[in-house]
Image (spheres, rainbow, N blue to C red):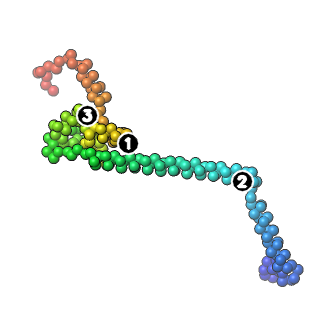
Amino acid sequence: MAGSLKDQLFKAGIASKKQIKQVELEKRKQSKQGSKPDNGQHTASVEAARQEKLQKDRALNEARKQAQVQRAGQAEIRQLVGQHRIRLPKDGDIRYYFISQDKVKQLWINADLQRQLASRRIALVCVDDRFELVPYEIAERIIQRDPNAVIKEDTERRDKIAAEEAEYEQFQIPDDLDW
């Protein structure tokens, strides 16, 4: 004989459709209740998972906000430099050397710009891998947004070299010394 037991009982007239549906309903209820673990453990694990997801979401949102603030700061820096940029001369005759990201870079400037750089009336700023000159007041505003954007003089290194040279001032180098 083919078919399930309930079909066979229904065909034989031993069970009615209503009884079959009631048995199926009870069977489904039992399978759902049997698959659930202890309610206390289940709610605790669900709550722990929910808290973990909330923490991950908060961390992700915080990272997004920080990235957005950083992009806004970079946009403000670009705008400040674009508005207050001092054009480099086309006929610059002096190489101005500076250190950027542990590399020695250079710009061609004239004597007037060199004096202004030395007296800190203008400053050198790195924006989008380009180096621009801006008034020092603007550079201070840029430092508030991103301290790494302004190329600073390496005064500590210069002072150290000057101190080392001062130690040897008393020793004269002979004029007839050949290297």
**Disc 3 marks which amino acid?**
Arg
- Give the mark nearer the N terminus: 3 vs 2: 2
**Disc 1 marks which amino acid?**
Arg
Cα separation between marks 3 and 2: 67 Å
Would you say the residues marked 3 and 2 are in contact, meaning their CB atoms lie under 8 Å apart?
no
Q: Badge 1, how many Cα within 10 Å: few under 14, some, many 20+?
A: some
Q: Do we see residue 165 in this rendering?
A: yes
Label 3 SS: loop
Cα separation between marks 3 and 1: 20 Å
Instruction: Kindly identify which numbered label has been placed on residue 120.
Output: 3
The residue nearer to you, when weighing 24 against 8, is: 24
Label 1 SS: helix
Q: Residue at x 37, y 42 (%)?
A: 146
Cα separation between marks 2 and 1: 49 Å
Q: Residue 100 placed where, x, y %? A: 30, 40
User: Measured along the vertical axis of the image, is residue 111 above or below residue 30?
Assistant: above
Q: Is residue 52 left or right of residue 36?
A: left
In the displayed orientation, state which residue is furthest to the top.
Answer: 170
Label 2 SS: helix
The residue nearer to you, when weighing 132 against 18, is: 132
**Residue assigned mark 2:** 42
**Disc 2 marks which amino acid?**
His
Q: Which quadrant is the C terminus positioned in?
A: top left
Q: Quadrant of residue 97?
A: top left
